[in-house]
Amino acid sequence: MARMIFVNLPVKDLATSKSFWSKLGYSFNPQFSDENTACLVISDTIFAMLMTEPRFKDFTAPGKEVADASKTSEVLLALSAESREEVDRLADTALASGGSPAAEAQDHGFMYGRSFTDPDGHHWELAWMDPAAGEG
């Protein structure tokens, strides 16, 4: 069985987060979702558990505050894309759907990437790399 990853992220407004990710073409697994949590399906093995801040705190160490990702760097989340065009499509859709630019696009010829922050300020990187660049 392939390993899976479940990235847990606090969100201020679950409905806003679900709407944002739906506009990018992603779906949610209702089996692992409820009024406080939405299981964002990124791939067959990658999921982001979007949790309201009170629900997120149920899983953290007592006394720790939830980081405000719009003010603090907490993590960089990187997703691969199948093409340069997919990088642009996802980044453009994210920006048109309530996301914000995070950094300048990076074009190294064999590798291309763009980034954005989601409505809660979580930093997402999108990257494509020419498969031929790894050969040889």
Image: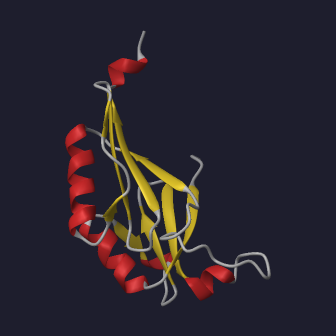
Q: Nearer the viewer, residue 116 or 129?
A: 116
Residue 35 x %, y %: 48, 90
**In the image as oriented, which residue stretches furthest toward the top?**
136
Q: Nearer the viewer, residue 87 or 32?
A: 87
Residue 52 x %, y %: 53, 84
Q: Is residue 40 above or below residue 90?
A: below
Residue 105 x %, y %: 30, 43
Quadrant housing the C terminus: top left
Q: Residue at x 61, y 88 (%)?
A: 54
Q: Nearer the viewer, residue 12 or 104?
A: 104
Q: Residue at x 35, y 25 (%)?
A: 131
**In the image as oriented, which residue stretches furthest toward the front?**
71
Q: Which quarter of the picture shows residue 130? A: top left
- From the viewer's perspective, tell me whether residue 93 is left or right of residue 134: left
Q: Is residue 26 above or below residue 37?
A: above
- From the viewer's perspective, tell me whether residue 130 is left or right of residue 135: left
Q: Is residue 65 above or below residue 132?
A: below
Q: Residue at x 55, y 60 (%)?
A: 73
